[in-house]
Image (cartoon, coloured by chain):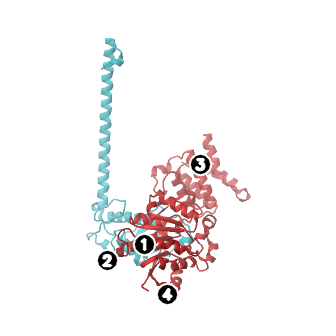
Amino acid sequence: MKLWGQILWTLLSVPRGRRGVLQGWAFNSWKTYSSLTGPLSATGMVNHWTRVFEERGIPEARESSEYIVAHVLGAKTFQSLKPALWTKPLTPQQLECIQELCGRRLQRMPVQYILGEWDFQGLSLKMVPPVFIPRPETEELVEWVLEEVAQRPHAVRAQDGPLILEVGCGSGAITLSLLSQLPKSRVVAVDKEEAAVSLTHENAQRLQLQDRIRIIHLDITSEGCCTHLLPWSPLDLVVSNPPYIFRKDMEQLAPEICSYEDLVALDGGDEGMDIITHILTLAPQLLNASGSIFLEVDPRHPELVSSWLQSHPDLHLSLVGVREDFCGRPRFLHVQKSAP
Amino acid sequence: MSSRSTWALLRLPLPLIRICSGKWGLRLQEKPALLFPGMAASTVQVAGRKDYPALLPLNESELEEQFVKGHGPGGQATNKTSNCVVLKHVPSGIVVKCHQTRSVDQNRKIARKVLQEKVDVFYNGENSPVHKEKLEAERRKRERKKRAKETLEKKKLLKELREASQNITEKKADADGIPRGFQE
């Protein structure tokens, strides 16, 4: 009993906030605790930490505690846990683990970094700060590319294909989902951050996809980057979720993003177009005659990209498709090489 | 009409509707096919889940979908983990909530699959393949339990018989004066 008492006290002693208010709160919670049935169960822990997060203004209070508790119990989501586990008492080790992970959430660490993993298109990927965390919208980008590839088999090499360049691979999410769903494809993935190159490599190995990927530490805005990529041309596709946030919007980013993710992976310059324009300039030199570029962008970019392409006719690129994300915002662009 | 913050009417852009009919195997129909349950229905294929033959197809225009609440600017500017999908079939009022996976995309697919099964039972009742499969699964489970119980009892009986015969042999050896280890 003494051990449980100690654990309970540790759990309830959240880091001190202002005015010692937390001490009073902790004591009240103790009283509430003893009257709750099964406080040391998964459900009890979720409820407890949801309250704690809410009181501390942590966004997604319930979701965060659910993911953390589920993870400690070996499941990916709380809903996918066997119902019997919701009420079963947790072991001291599990409680300690939950305590530690939730403590990190109190520091506004993103859940994906706390768990050290996240899913993308059904693949489980390792997540390590500050490498950019894949966003749910980006799954739609992959879906679009897959659709297009399925519809244009003649544009793809018979032997092995398509041959894809991903710019800014981050954790490898886009690259690895394409590789896993297009068994004959090959990808050249580049990123300017060494940490991203490393993580993509690690995730590729975890998924046994390392044979069809080449990962290069390369900044595509640097002079002469084209020479490094020419050996792989002609490519069938260029795919990217490049940094596309408008410089002035960077200050509105949540602490989860500002404090933990690599801001270089987000900042797209004044109009969020800096990296996009570099990609569009580089791509025609690498793509085959009817090659395509698929990009995730800010909802303001379809128009901006359209006019930019019109003012750069020498690139022989045209915007042939715009697709909305699941929130109904124009989020994805399909740019295609046209005949000179 | 309902505001965006509560029930947002699904407006799937055209390309997305193509995904639905292609990858998910759900066929869209212009007419409200669900008012005529007897009409031809399509097979649903969602990877990893059981396939039911001939379930009533779901008409996307009759669905209302609610995603992540307050998603903010979205895309790179947001990092949300709430991937719960709430899907409502308007004509029947059936609602399905799915937070089975960490992926919005997967949850949408699963939600549609589950909703289609529920809607089929709603309109077809006992005739629904879903209902029939459930009964069949329950029957199989009862059968398995019964067989397991029988096997257990047989084993128990065998064990008792063996122990009984061993006792007899040991008693006999004691009576003969032969050390126990040397029985045949």
Chain of the residue under label 3 = A
Label 4: few (<14), some (14–19) or many (≥20) C-alpha neighbours in 10 Å: few
User: Which residue is at a point 38% across and 68% down the rendered structure image?
Assistant: A160
Chain of the residue on which disc 1 is drawn: A
**Residue A27 horizontal/vertical position (percent):** 67, 51
Chain coloured red here:
A
- Give the mark, 4 or 1, whose residue is nearer the N terminus: 1
Which numbered disc, 3 or 1, marks the residue that appears first in the sequence? 3
Residue B12 visible in the snapshot:
yes
**Rendered position, B10 above or below A318:** above
Instruction: Identify the chain of the residue marked 2, using the numbered disc in the image.
Output: B
For label 4, the residue is A313
Which chain appears cyan? B
What amino acid does circle 4 point to?
Pro
Same-chain check, marks 4 and 2: no
Which of B5/A206 is in front? Answer: A206
Marks 4 and 1, how far apart at CA: 25 Å
Label 1, secondary structure: give it: helix
**In the visual, does A62 lie left or right of B168?**
right
Determine whether the residue tagged by mark 4 lies in a helix, strand or loop: helix
Amino acid type of the residue tagged 1 in the rendering? Val
Mark 4 or 1: the one toward you: 4
Kindly report which numbered mark, 1 or 2, lies closer to the viewer in this rendering: 1
Q: Chain of mark 4?
A: A
The amino acid marked with disc number 2 is Lys
Q: Assess disc 1: are there few (<14), some (14-19) or many (≥20) residues with their C-alpha within 10 Å of its C-alpha.
A: some
Circle 2 sits in a helix, a strand or a loop, which is it? loop
Residue A340: quadrant of the picture: bottom left
Residue at the disc numbered 1: A145
